[in-house]
Image (cartoon, grey):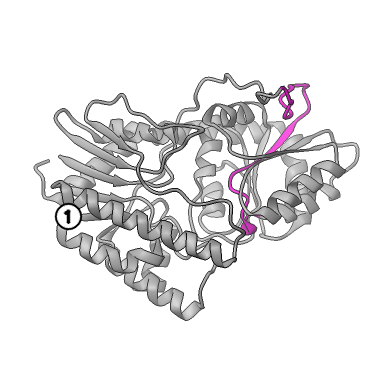
Amino acid sequence: MDIYWYWPYLRQEELALADGVLRHGDHLAVHCTPRPLDPISSSLEGCEVLPALPGVDERSSEGSISWGLSRASTYIGRARSRHSVLKGETFDVAHIIYLNPFVDWLALRSLARRVPLVSTVHDVTPHQRRMPTRVERSILAREYANAGTIVVHHEWVGERLSSEFDVDPARINYIPLPVLPPPPIVDDGVDDDGVDRGGVDDGVPEILFFGTLRRNKGVEVLLNAVRLLPTELQFRLVIAGRGFAEVEQLVRDAASRDKRIVAEVGYATAERKAALYARCSVNVLPYTSFESQSAVLQDAYANSVPLIVSDVGALGSTVRSEGTGWVVPPSDAKALAEAIIESLRDDPAAKQAGANMAKVAAQRTPALVGASLRRLYEEVAGAPQ
């Protein structure tokens, strides 16, 4: 098979999924953005990485005219680059792993005439609303109508697509996110300039918040919960990631006021992420709103780190059904503080959650998830099984 992946935000470790998809004689073109700090390469036979998609200009302030023009230029540039690759080669199937409603409501229609499409829907609606609700829903409905065969990572997302956007359930396929094995830990938590980022393992239990610092991620709720924790409780809260400027500043300010909080604002390599998870006792996802399944959830599973999640999107139902941690109401700092205390003091419950995670991880290896994708591609392309 000749397969195309459109994956702008690909990380090196995620490329492990290709090993479960490819067979001898196949060709997989992986179209992504370049990552100067964490370059992507492939040693898999038949897997070609094309780091040629335009990156986003991070210099403009969000909401400014220059920011809007830059984003529009980037999104259009990515769509053109994708179209160029698909026009230049005959693929059996094209998998659009990240949809962009600003361009794909129109672009997917022309792509579908050229190649059978598979599209992954991560977020039923965007995390951040950037247009009037009626306009957004109209654009999303067109995008989903033109998306071909749809992949979702949790049944909750599929149900929302059907109920909110009238997507035919026969078009929707549930394939879970793979649980990627963590890389060897080589990061000691010290920057190249010698600054320690909180990498000393002194036996103090660590609470980890990891991921993009968006407004819906509940960082303020988490910081309010920390203020409610008993003064005698030993812990360290590590907040690692980058994102919106005001959320980054909120994290820095909190760390400057409270020595129990460590701010690691910036890009984290796979090795640094592995080091953070290896040390932490519990992983918190205190999101205030969410319309998806979370890749951060899979990081916790990969490291058997118990979770505390808000009951939004697919987070609460996943953790409850799989017995992998604690679920709290969104935007409830008191409930979050109580769950943190319980997670640090109830050792048997934490160990059981970790054991349950290990069982789930064994069922969602990149090889197994990749094989499920392969079967779907063959069905979509009409290839022999």
Q: Where residue 308 appears, x then y in whole percent?
A: 65, 46
Q: Specify the quadrant that holds the N terminus.
A: top left
User: Three-letter amino acid code at disc 1?
Assistant: Val
Can residue 120 be seen in the rendering of this structure?
A: no
Query: What's the magenta region?
Result: 194-217
Q: Is residue 381 above or below residue 137?
A: above
Q: Is residue 41 above or below residue 135?
A: above
Report crowding for label 1: few under 14, some 14 to 19, many 20 or more residues within 10 A (C-alpha): some
What secondary structure is the stretch in magenta mostly built from? loop
The one nearer the camera, 320 or 285, is: 285
Q: Where residue 152 appears, x then y in whole percent?
A: 37, 54
The one nearer the camera, 319 or 112, is: 112
Secondary structure found at label 1? loop
The residue furthest left is 384
The one nearer the camera, 71 or 5, is: 71
Relative to 40, 346 lies left or right: right
Relative to 124, 189 lies left or right: right
Q: Where residue 89 appears, x then y in whole percent?
A: 15, 46
Q: Specify the quadrant that holds the C terminus.
A: top left
Q: Write the residue at 87% across / 44% down.
A: 257
Relative to 142, 253 lies left or right: right
The residue furthest right is 231
Find disc 1 in the rendering and name its residue: 115
The residue furthest front is 66
Q: How many marks?
A: 1
Q: Write the residue at 74% across / 47% down.
A: 251
Magenta-drawn stretch contains 209: yes
Relative to 104, 136 lies left or right: right
The answer to which quarter of the image holds residue 49 is: top left
Q: Where residue 237 appears, x then y in whole percent?
A: 75, 38
Magenta-drawn stretch contains 177: no
Q: Write the residue at 48% across / 59% down.
A: 70
